[in-house]
Amino acid sequence: MSLEAKDLLHRAKLARNANWISFLLLGIVSMGWVPRIPEIKDAIGLSNGAFGFVLIGSTFGSITGAQLAGRFIHTYGSQRVIFVGGIIMPAGLAGMALSNTATALFLTLFTMGVGYALLDMSYNFQGTVIEKILGRRYMSSFHGMWSTGAFITTVIGGVITRHVSPQVNLLVIAAICLVAYLISAKFLLSPEIDGHKGDAEHEAKIPFFGKNVMPLWLLGVGLLASLVGEGAASDWGAILLRDEMGYEKGVYASAFASFSLAMIVSRFLGDRALDYFGPARLVKLGGYLGGSIWGLAMAIAIPLSATHPLIALVIVNIGFVAAGLGIGPMFPAFILAATKIPGIAPAVAISRVGVIGIAGFFFGPTVTGIISQFTNLSIGMIYPVAMLILSGYLSRGIKSSKPQM
């Protein structure tokens, strides 16, 4: 092996380690406000429907950021985009901590959504290149680190709700992660070696609709459907346990904590599972089984909570565990499949699938809120369950592949 090849492998291993840390930070920042959602919602005086509409700010931000990410990565390289996103996203979280009106919360959610999408698309692009250089799957474990970060921030946030205000909680997270984002970015693949421009056979500009991009739409909608479930678990899990089942502060954070822990397990096992089952079959099983068990658990636990609260708490958390196990490998599977579409630059393909899919993470909770406003949250949660099952059905758009040197 030449010195140049050894140096490339060394830099790729450093980037792999930095990408693990980067995804951890992304999970911490993006989910940092989840345990404090009921308090923030009540402090501003928002109904379920109004809160759902405020969440559209994240939707618009994520769509904007994901749309820009592909072109920016292709033009400037993913590392440079990460430096920008690493400033924008913590700024959005800090703004959320200081918001005292629905408009302010909407705008800061938009800011956070832009930063999240820029970082998420860039880290995923880095992941695909790292896999190619090292010849091994790592994508699911990268997302496992995201889930680890989400779990850590959710558990700690739930524990400190009685002792620390949401403002202090979120400002501390934003400040620490801002510095950590910028440090970790220095060790990622530079524009000179990340292959961000693709090659002569890859198109950097693609139409939004058309025959050639239909595979991206199929993958994007499948990803959207899975992320609707993930968004609902994060944004409505605590409110479901508090408002529909009567659990108190701290306890109601257990739903998303259970979901996050299950995602951690499934994602760290996901690289091997993707090879063993194949991406399409794994997504299919996760969608059908995860969605069915999640829906059944809530259907049993919610009415049971009035008379048997402890049993109901166990059952509902089993449902959130099943959803987490099912959703865990889906994002890596759909994103990796996008990079295999012939004739489209990987960064652009990831961005396009991200534009369609990542919106589900933010827009899904809004739809759940609208349904809940006219019925109740118990019925509103049928929507993310159905979407998770749909994601399993759309696994047919995934083509099996292995990372190549």
Image (cartoon, helix red, strand yellow):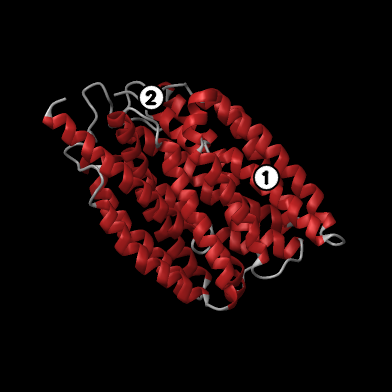
Q: Amino acid at mark 1?
A: Tyr
- Asked whether, in this view, residue 72 is left or right of residue 376, the answer is left
Residue 197: x and y in percent read 22, 33
Which residue, as the protein is rendered here, is positioned at the far left?
A: 3
Q: Which quarter of the figure has residue 8?
A: top left
Amino acid type of the residue tagged 2 in the rendering: Lys
> Measuring 17% from the left and 29% from the top, which residue is drawn there?
5
- Viewer-nearest residue: 113 or 47: 113
Residue farthest to the right, as pictured: 307
Tell how many labels. Answer: 2
Residue drawn at x 33%, y 60% is 88
In the visual, does 285 lie left or right of 171? right
Left or right of residue 56, residue 239 in this image: right
Give the numbered dot on residue 383: 1
Residue 54 seen: no
Quadrant of the rendering where the N terminus is positioned: top left
At 25% from the left edge and 47% from the top edge, which residue is drawn? Answer: 79
- Circle nearer the N terminus (2, 1): 2
- Locate the C terminus by quadrant: top left
Tell me the tag on residue 336.
none
- What is the number of the mark on residue 340? 2
Residue nearer the viewer, 149 or 76 = 149
Please tell me whether residue 63 is drawn above or below residue 29 in the rendered image. above
